[in-house]
Structure formats: C-alpha cells, structure tokens
Image: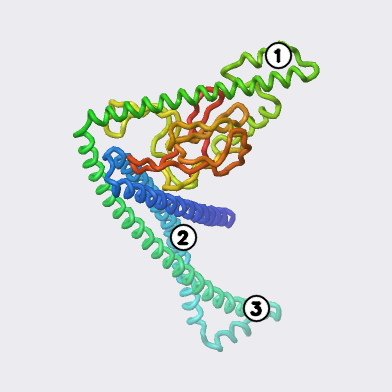
Amino acid sequence: MPRILFSLIFILFTGIAFSQSQQEKLEARKAQIQREIAENQKFLQTVRSKEKTATNELILQKKKIQLKETLINTTEKQRRLVENDMYINQVKINRLNKELDDLREDYAEMIRKSYKSRSMQSRAMFLLSSENFLQAYKRAQYMKQYTSYRKTQGEEIKKKAEELQAFNQKLNVQKAEKERLIEENRKERETLEKERQEQQKLINDVLKDKKKITAEIKKRQQEAKNIDRQIDKLIREAIAAANRKTAAEAAKAKGTSTAAAKAATKSVNKIVLTPEGQLIANNFRANKGKLPWPTEKGFISLGYGDQAHPVHKSLVVHNSGLEISTEPGADARAVFGGEVSSIMVISPVNKAVMIQHGDYFTIYQNLSTVNVQKGDKVTTKQKLGKIRTNGDTGKTTLKFLVLQNTVYSNPQTWLAPM
C-alpha cells in the first residue's frame, strides 16, 4: 500500500512539473505571436497611411487574423492546462480532507479514552495491579508511548491542516488564473470578430473592381515568369561554368579519363560536384529545417507554389519562392555559407543575389542595394543588401528561392521555425 501511494504522489508531482513546463512554453509562444501581431499591425498601418490598394491591405489583414486565431488557440491550451492542474490539486485536497477527518476521529477517540482514565489514582492502580515488575515496567512504557502518540497525532493534524490550507490557496490562485485566461480569450475573440468584419469590407471593396485586379495579377505573374526565366538562364550558366572548371581540373589530375571530363562538360542541368562541392551540398542538405531566416524580422505574406487569390478564388497565383514581408530598411541575410554565383539587375531599383552551396542555390530577390560581388565567399547571416520598399504598395518584401540545380524547392521547409 505505501508503495502504491508513493507511486501516485510521484505521478502527481511529475504531472505538475510537466504542466508548469508546458505553461512556460505556451506563454513564450504567446509572446512571440503577440510580437508578430504587433509587427503585422505596423505593416498594415504603413499600407493604410499611404492609401494603397485594398488587395495589399487584405493580404496583411488576413495574416493578422491568422495570428489572432493562433493566439486564441494558444490561450485555450493554457486554460486546459490550468484546469488539469486544478483537477490534480482538487484530488489532493480531497485526499487530505479524508486523511484529516480520519486523524481527527482517531484523536477524538484517544481523548475520550484518556478522559475516562484521567485521574492519577486510576493510572497508579493500573501500575500497582501488575502481577510482577516486568509487567509494571511494560505498562509504564505503554503509558509513555500512548502519551507520545497523542502528541504526534496532534502535530500530524496540524501539519495536514496547514498542507490543506496551502493547496486551497493554490487552487484559488489557479481559479483566478483560469478566469484571467477566459477573459483574455473573450477580448481576443471580440477583436477577432472586428478584424473579420473589417476583412469582409475589404473583400467587398476588392470585388467591386475585379477586372482591374485580374489584369494586375496577370501582369505581376508575367513579370514573375520573366524573372524566373532569367534565374533559370543564370543557373544553367552557373552549372555550365562549374562543370567546365571541374572538367579542366579532372583532365589535369592523374588517373582521370578524358571521357569523364567530357561528360562533366556536357551536363547542363546538373552540377558535377567535386569532393569539396559534395561536402558543401551535404552540409546544406543536413541543415534542412534549421536554416536561419533570410530576414531578421517579418512574416510569410505569400507562400510557395500555386495558390488561390485571397479574394478571387478562381484566380490561381503561382510563386516560385517565398515572399517575406518585413520592416522598411531591413537587410537580406545569407541563410548558409557559400559563394556568390551571380548578381541580377532586374531593374534599376530591383536586384537579386544568387549564392551557390554545392549543387544548391539560394536566391534573394527584390533588393534595392547589394553589398556583395560575384565570386565573394559569404557566411551564414551575412548581410547581402537592403530589401526594396515598393512605392506602389508600401510593402517591404523579400522573395526567397531555393533550388537544387534547376529544380525549385519550397523554401519554407528549409527554414527553422521563427
């Protein structure tokens, strides 16, 4: 029985420690979400202050609503954890109440028996009626132990009462915390509803001018395709240059056949890696899901691949990379060490940096200025240039791409959670 009780107590305390750890993690996550909401609101105000199109405002509004929903869900998880803790503490309170009742009943019974034999004469008679000295000694010891036991029982009752009071106080604190979280979620839900109403107004504004928006989307998609074609061309040129270099080195090396060198030269879609290049590529691949973001702050305003327009669901928007909205004046950063393969000048105010990592390429597009040159070796988080703030939309957005040779990849899967 004591072993079972000890196991139960151990499980309860382990559960509390785990719950506290979970609460701390959720509180940290909430703080992060609230920071993202604040940043999103700042971007939204920037767009509004410049009286830009409803479409851009709608995209930011949609992101803000998603963050609010995440915040509400996180607070709800906290509330459930508090309820679990309250249940555990209530179980302890019930157990302590039962133990305290049993102790008090036992103690009361001892007091009653003690009262019946309270006189010194009855105690003396109890000793004198002994048949021999050994029995008298044992009776004296019993009386001494009985008195000590009464004292111990009294102290145990006091200890249990204090413990019960402490758990009741803890339960009251948890009830207050639960009420706080419920009220916090109520307010967040109210603001969320207002945000949704505002979003609907924006949708209505956008729907009024569908033809114009459709033409704008098609124009931007065509511009994006043209830039992607430029990128493809540059990557193929980089592959060809790398393979020519590898072939030349292979031809000079002893024991390497001329056929192998020619094969490397003919490959136009895939880099023939040297041992050093293979090592870099392996290291890059091993860091998938752990790479730092190419911006210090920001959020994903447009994901990778084909996706429906936020209002006109029939319009499909294709994105070959990841668009990250950030603060005006922000820098683009290298996500991994490598060599600057190319600097693209898309327009006088729009540049891109392409970095090679073995047979992988990362591209940082929509830069107003560039800090590096072709052939430079860069390190992780090194600043590559300033991200351009669009004069028409008021948005500061970096387009980030990841490719292996000529094959595009979803950049979000490569980045660590922000």
Location of residue 312 by image quarter: top left
Residue 243 vs 14, above or below: the answer is above
Q: Where is residue 78 in the image (x, y as percent from the top left)?
A: 41, 52
Q: Residue at x 59, y 42 (%)?
A: 380
Q: Residue at x 45, y 31 (%)?
A: 346
Give neighbour class at mark 1: few <14, some 14-19, many 20+ (Cα, 10 Å). few
Give neighbour class at mark 2: few <14, some 14-19, many 20+ (Cα, 10 Å). some
Tag 3 residue: 141
Q: Position of residue 103 (x, y in %)?
A: 48, 69
Residue type, numbered disc 2: Lys
Tag 1 residue: 260
Q: Residue 298 carries which label?
A: none
Residue type, numbered disc 1: Ala
Identify the element where label 1 is drawn: helix
Q: Earlier in the sequence, mark 3 or mark 2?
A: 2
Q: Position of residue 260 (x, y in %)?
A: 70, 14
Tag 2 residue: 92
Residue at mark 2 to residue at mark 1: CA–CA distance: 76 Å
Residue type, numbered disc 3: Gln
Q: Which of marks 3 and 2 is in front?
A: 2
Identify the element where label 3 is drawn: helix
**Which one is nearer the viewer's eye here, 3 or 387?**
387
